[in-house]
Image: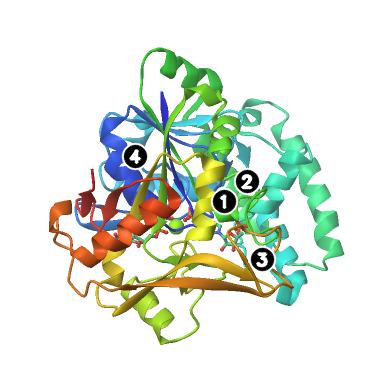
Amino acid sequence: MVDVILGLQWGDEGKGKIVDYFAPGYEMIARFQGGPNAGHTLYVDGKKIVLHQIPSGIFRENKINLIGSGVVLDAVILKKECESVAAFGVDYKKSLFISERTHLILPSHRALDRASETAKGHDKIGSTLKGISPAYMDKTGRNGLRVGDLLDDDFKSKYQSLRKKHQQILDNFSFDEDISQAENEFFEALEFLKSLKIVNGEYFINDAITSGKRILAEGAQGSMLDVDFGTFPFVTSSNTITAGVCSGLGISPQKIKEVIGITKAYCTRVGSGPFPTELHDEMGEMIRKNGNEFGSTTGRPRRCGWIDLVALNFACMINGVTQLVMTKADVLDNIDVLKVCNQYSINGKESMQVPFQMEGKDVKPLYKKFDGWKTDITGIKEYENIPSEMDTYINYINTTLKVPVKYISNGPGTDQLIVAS
Ligand code: GDP
Ligand code: IMO
Ligand code: MG
C-alpha cells in the first residue's frame, strides 16, 4: 500500500523532517511532483541539510528513493545534491532511482522563467526561478525532453530543436543573457545522470506494491499552491495534492491508504498571492523570527500569519486527509493570545468556503481567540505533558477539521515529535 505525506498550506510545512521521521517504516520513498523549487530540510547527525530533488528518505538505510515521472528534474542540481548526501556516507548509486518518464529542466527553461517573471513586473508570481513552469509547459505542450530520451542517439538534435524554440520566445522577451556556461554544466550533469539507476518507473513502483513493499509518497509545495485548486495564478505548475500521487507515480487510487497532511501551527507563504490571515505587524515579525521563516530554496523572508481553518478544511477535503501533523508548535511558545481563523468575511458575507478567487474581493479572516501556553514545549515527549492551553488549541483544530492531529512537532530535530494518539 501507499501512504502519502503532503503539505496543506503554501509549502514549507516541514515535510522533509516528517518524511525522514516516517521513512524507517517504509521500503520506498517516492517524490511524485515538483522539482528543485522544493526545499526540504532535515537534520542528519545534528547537521542541517536541504534537499531539493532527492526524496527525504535518502538518509535512512536500505531504502529505495524514487524520483517519479511527475517530477521535473534539474540534472545540475541533482548532481550537486548527490555529492552533498555522499559526504554524509549515503550510497546514492544504490538507493536512488529515477523514472524514465521524468521531464528534464533545461537551462533555457530557467532563462524562460526569469524572462517571464521579469516581464510580469508587479504581477510576478514570485517563482523560485528554477524553470518549473516552462518545464511543465513543455510537458503539457508535448515538447519536453524526458530522462529516458537521454539514452537515444538523437538526444542532442532533439535538444537543439527545443532550444531553438525557446530562443524564439526569449527573443520576444528581449532576454539576452548568455546561457552557454549553464549549457556546458547541463551536458556534464547529463552524463552523471546517465550513470544513475534509470527505471521504467510505473512497473518499478507497481511491482514493489505487488511484492508487499510499503511506499511513502512525498509531496512538494503545498495544497494551496496546486495548479488546479490553489490560489491561481499564484501557484506552482503541478498537482501537489493526493491526486498527483496517482498521475505522478502511475499508481491507482485504490492503492492509497493513509493521507498524512502537514500544517504548521500557524501559516506562512513565500512569493506573491492571496494570504487572508497574513500579519503585517510585530506579531508577524515575531513569528518569522522565532520560526526562522526564511525560504529553504531562495532565502526569501516568508510571509507569516495565523492558522487558517477555512483553507485547511478545503485542503483536507480535496486531499482526503486521514491524519494531521502539526509542525512548529514551539514557535508559538511565548505568545499571549493565539488566533485561529474559522471563517472568512467575503465582501461582508460570512463564508466557510475558499472562493474561486480572492483578488478584487474584500476577504477578511474572522478569528476565534485562544490563550497561549506560554511554556517552552521543545523538550516534551508525551502528549499528556503538553500544556492544557495547547490541548484546547489542538482539540479545536481536530473538531473543526474533523481530522485528528496525530503528531505535533515541537522543534526542528527529528526526535522532536509528540505522538497524540
Ligand atoms: P518543507 O519544505 O515542508 O520540507 O519545509 P522546509 O524545510 O522548507 O521548512 C521548514 C523549516 O522548519 C525547516 O527549517 C525545518 O528545520 C524547520 N522545522 C520543522 N519542524 C519544526 C518544528 O516543529 N519546530 C521548529 N522550530 N522548526 C521546525
Ligand atoms: P516546498 O516543497 C514554498 C512557491 C513560490 C511561488 C510559487 C511558484 O519546500 O514546500 P515555482 O518556482 O514553483 O514556479 O513558484 O510557488 N513555491 C514554494 N513555496 N515551498 C515550496 O516548496 C515552494 N515551491 C514553490 O514561492 O510563490
Ligand atoms: Mg521548503
From mark 4 to mark 3, how far is it between C-alphas?
31 Å
Residue furthest front as drawn: 349
Q: Residue at x 43, y 43 (%)?
A: 54
Q: Which residue is mark 1?
A: 185
Residue at 23%, 71% (x, y): give it. Answer: 373
Q: Relative to 409, is 316 above or below?
A: above
The answer to whether residue 14 is seen in the rendering is no
Q: Which residue is mark 3?
A: 125
The residue to which callout 2 is attached is 238
N-terminal label among 1 and 3:
3
The residue to which callout 4 is attached is 58
Which numbered disc, 4 or 3, marks the residue that appears first in the sequence?
4
Q: Amino acid at mark 1?
A: Glu
Left or right of 271, for residue 15: left
Which mark sits nearer the N-terminus, 2 or 4? 4
Residue 267, percent across and down? 45, 65
Above or below, comparing residue 46 to residue 294 in the picture: above
